[in-house]
Image (spheres, rainbow, N blue to C red):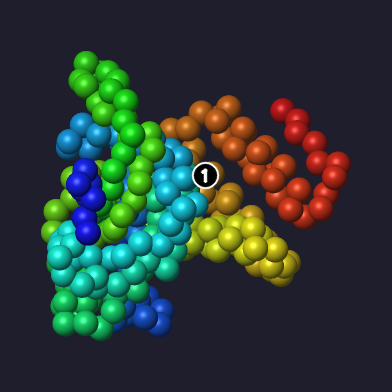
Amino acid sequence: MKPDHMQFKSAGFGMAIEGEGLQSGELVIGYASVFNNIDLGDDRVIPGAYRKTLAETPNVPVLWQHHSEDMPIGKTLLLQEDSYGLIFQARIEPTRQGLDARILVKSGAIQSVSIGYEAKTRMTRVDGRQVRDLEEIKLYEISLVNWAMNPLAQLTSTSSANLQACLKDSLLIAQVEQEQKRGIPVPERKLVTYLEAQQRRLERALYNGKTARQLLYEVSFELQELAKKAGVTHATNRC
């Protein structure tokens, strides 16, 4: 049953079309939501808004055009916040509607996703306009849709190669952090790749206009966390 107060919000997203499963459109990867960007509905998603819902419900159904009365066309395999937004990976099942969706995704006819959600909000004023900040979001579903509420929901570059690289980095970071939470040992080679992905993510954040102080804080925090996970007890934070 659809919640009475569920709302919908769309975001542009990029598809990584390579590798087994991605060639056929069976697997889709992208951003379902972008942080700190005011969309066409004057809404802005605040970083951390999905933290509680992801802890409660780590995966959600994937629908076609928010048709909650129809069967889902798939489900998410990964949902994770990063510094840019809510990244997702989903499998589109070979149902009649799912197969149609795969074809449209592969051809590029469908390039947007939308979320079904409820939110705790706060009104604020930005450059003379009223903006609704979404501070805590309850996520119910992700849909493949025709149009995006947030057409600027892209990465630092609109090229598919850069978008694909960013998505791969975020997926790797999310996977390693999930393994660490479950106590699974991370091989040294994969840990090095993880650190390189973190470095690229911070470089993109700098390109997007973050201050040196913000980046220093993020680097220091992540190095401290990594040191804890690696069992290093004398890590220091200097600036």
Above/below status of 135 relative to 9? above
Instruction: Identify the residue at horizontal 58%, vertical 49% (top origin).
Output: 199
Nearest the camera: 221 or 63? Answer: 63
Crowding around mark 1 (Cα neighbors within 10 Å: few <14, some 14 to 19, many 20+) is: few
Q: Quadrant of the C terminus?
A: top right
Image quadrant of residue 44?
top left
State the image coordinates of residue 72 (x, y, percent, origin top left): 24, 70
Instruction: Identify the residue at horizontal 29%, vertical 58% (top origin).
Output: 141
Nearest the camera: 86 or 189? Answer: 86
Nearest the camera: 172 or 122? Answer: 122
Q: Quadrant of the N terminus?
A: bottom left
Which residue is farthest right?
234
Above/below status of 234 relative to 103? above
Which residue is farthest top?
128
State the image coordinates of residue 180 (x, y, percent, origin top left): 66, 60
Instruction: Identify the residue at horizontal 65%, vertical 67% (top origin).
Output: 190
Instruction: Identify the residue at horizontal 31%, vertical 39% (top origin).
Output: 119
Q: Is residue 53 left or right of residue 140?
A: right
Residue 3, visible in the rendered structure = yes
Above/below status of 29 relative to 2? below
State the image coordinates of residue 207 (x, y, percent, origin top left): 44, 39
Residue linked to disc 1: 203
> What amino acid type should be assigned to the residue bearing mark 1?
Glu
> Circle 1 — which element?
helix
Residue 169, visible in the rendered structure = no
Above/below status of 162 relative to 223? below
Q: Is residue 36 left or right of residue 205?
A: left
State the image coordinates of residue 116 (x, y, percent, origin top left): 25, 52
